Each structure stands twice: as C-alpha cells, then as structure tokens.
Image: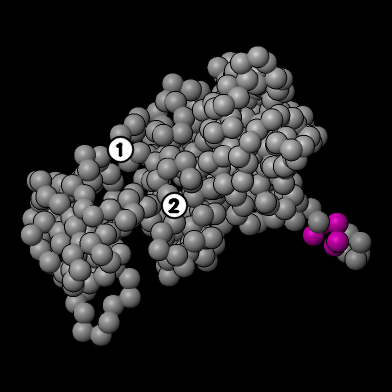
Amino acid sequence: MTRTTRAAIRRALQAAVAVGVVATLCLAPSCVARRVVTHVPSEIATPSGAARPVRVLLAENVPSAGLAISAPYTIEPWGPRTRGTPAVLAHCPPLADGRVRSSAAALIVGDRHFPDDAVLLRIQGSAALTVDGRRYRGDLAVRRLGEGRLALLNVLPIEDYLYGVLGGETYPGWPAAALEAQAVVARSYAMWRMAQRRDGPFDLYATVMDQNYLGMAKEDPRLNAAVDRTAGMVLLYQMRLFRCYYHSTCGGHTEAVQEVFPDPPLLPLSAVACPYCKDSKHFSWTRLIPKVELADALAKSGQGIQQLMGIAVSARTATGRAKEITVTLGGGRSAAMPASEFRLAVGPSKLPSTFFDLRATAEGYEFQGRGFGHGVGMCQWGSKGMADAHFSAPEILRHYYPGAQLTRLYATH
C-alpha cells in the first residue's frame, strides 16, 4: 500500500468519524447516534464527570421567606466544612407552613437554629419544595448575608431547571421543532453561565438578567418533552461553550453581537436575515413618547442629561439598527450615547428595540420600529416561523448560530 493510499484511507476514516459526530444532531427518539456523548467541560462537571447541579438565585438580601416542604428533608452544611462539622446537621419531617430567616447569629429554618453561614435543605422527594408560594423541583440552599438578611438558591439538575425556563421563555402550543431549539439554546446559555460563575455564590439569576425561571408555575408536558428529547445537547463553537443570546423578535434581521454588547465578534453570533418572524405582534410597531417623558427618563438614567432639546440617530449598524443616539442639550451642547443604553433608559416596554426611525412631532417623538429585544442570536418568533415552515430544530439552530456545532455533552439515561 502506497503512502498516498494510506493517507487517503486515513482521511476517509476521519471523515467517517466526523459524520458520526455530526449524527449527534439527530433529535429523533430512535436515533442510534444519541449514544455518542462528548465529555462535560471540566468547569461544570462533578468529579464523576456528570454535569453538576445548577444554582439559581431566587432571592437576595431578603429578611425571610415562606417555606413549605412536602417530604422529609435533611439540613446539611453548604460549601466547605470545617473539621468536626457533621455531614448532616438535622433530619426533618415535612414542613407544612414555615419560614426561613436569618438572625445575627444563626440561620433559622422552621423552629431550628443553625450557626452556619450557609445550609442546604436536601429534600427526599420530587417537586416537594415551595418558596413564597411558588413550587420548585430540587433542593434549597440558604446563605446568611449578615444584618438579618439572606439569599435563597434553588439547587437542581439542569434538565429540571430547563423545565422551568421553557415555561417562562416560550409557549407550549408552538411547534415541537421550535421548542426543541429553545431547549438547546437555554441549556447552552445555562452551561456557559455555570462555567463563567463556577467560583461565585450562584450560577444564574431567576429573571431576565439571565433566563426567566418560574419553577413549576408554567411547566407543561409539551415543554418538558422538548427538554427530554434534547437532553444533554448544547451548541459549541470550536468545541467551546459560548453565550447563546436569544430574543423575542428580530424584525427581519438579527444583529451581530459586537454591535450590541461589549463582546468580540463571534461567527455564531453574526447577523443573519430572518424572514420568519412576521407573525409576532412586535414585528412592526409605532410609539409616540412625549418630550417631557423622554427628558425625565434620560435625566434619571445616569447620563447627566438634564435639558433635552432634540434627539437624533447619529450612527447605525450594518443591519439598520440605531447604534448611537445624539441628544441635543441647552446652550448648543450635545451628548452621544449607545442606542442600547438609550432604549433601556426609556424602557424596553416603551421602546421595544433599537431597530427604529424617529421624528419630532408636536407632542414629542414618534418612533417607528421593528422587533422586540436586543436582536442577537435566535429570534424566538423566527424559530416558530421556521418550524411552521417544516424546518427541524437543527436547521433552525444552524440558521441563527452559523458555524456552531450541535453536540450531546451527556446522556441522562
């Protein structure tokens, strides 16, 4: 066999392996390639190699919270233990109607006092935890912050966490492919955050500061099934996790990440055309905002703008979104600010996106725009439109995250 022939065979084998890895994109329940599993990144792995539980911040700097647990539970030290500290501090029966609170010297769970700075309530039942009237899967970590304040964290497997995220981020009546795409993106984002904050006190906020997590409040069998069908699957770029941004409605074109956030350019977060989100009520919109209301919002935004004389778009991105807003002030002065900061100052509900034109009117300023959200990554209404047009979840993800690889990091069974 010649050297050239051996090289050709080697290339063919490498190509076959590559095809085997790409086959992990298949989401069909019967797909044999589901067994191909990539190792979980060390930043989010347990010593056994599985994905560690996710720590979701439910509340911070609160004096107390209502607590009910419908199963027996143990109270254990949370975090590193000092020598002599027992592995289990207390064995507890179900708690029907209690509170968790903090004093200057102890954490108080029900009627039990613990001098520890942090404890974990490890619950011996499924979906048995209720905090301030909202039901959760998993366990509860409680940290004492001093001065009678505490932080509450829901600690649970990432797949269980995703059940609560999909309930807060999408609609159960959407096509299965759109729900599967959302599950993959939400998992990818969560794991990226887990890696970024691995040494911090928590992984994810339970709000839109990360992902909207509602516990079991809006769980639905259709949403849970989408999570289960995609279990362990994430998007990687060059075999690394990245921040999988997503938003409600792009208005016809997504935006490149560096145009909105202080992030470097990244191929999967490039701007792509999206003709699929026209069914969204936010695809196009008009807002008339009084001048005095804009002036008041900008004055409160920390931009140092006290007197508003005029507003104009002074720079745009390649897709046409406003990139910079110039505000004319009294005395002929002017100040420029990023359009994304301008939008947040005015309020996202009043100004759904930066994809707008504006003009002065007798009443104030009229904004004619498209889309809802920052515009980076997957357009959720676009994913629905693609699914309605019979695109699969992998095809949706390839469209919105060009160059990313859909990979199964772990199997759940």
Name the residue that disc number 2 marks: 204
Vertical relation: 294 (above or below) 233: above
Name the amino acid, label 1.
Met
- The image shows residue 378 at horizontal and vertical percentages of 61, 35
Name the residue that disc number 1 marks: 216
Left or right, 40 with respect to 239, comes to left
User: Is 381 in front, or is 125?
Assistant: 381
Residue at image point 39% right, 33% down: 167
Magenta portion: prevailing SS class: helix
- The image shows residue 273 at horizontal and vertical percentages of 74, 28
Determine the residue located farthest toward the bottom in the rendered image.
Answer: 83
Q: Secondary structure at mark 2?
A: strand
- The image shows residue 137 at horizontal and vertical percentages of 28, 46
Magenta range is: 6-10
Q: Quadrant of residue 2?
A: bottom right
- Please tell me which of labels 2 and 1 falls first in the chain: 2
Residue at image point 72% right, 46% down: 258
Crowding around mark 2 (Cα neighbors within 10 Å: few <14, some 14 to 19, many 20+) is many
User: Is 365 in front, or is 204?
Assistant: 365
Vertical relation: 5 (above or below) 78: above
Q: Quadrant of residue 290?
A: top right
- Residue 91 tag number: none
- The image shows residue 102 at horizontal and vertical percentages of 20, 62
**By what rule are the colours in the image chosen?**
one colour
Residue at image point 47% right, 41% down: 208
Name the amino acid, label 2.
Leu
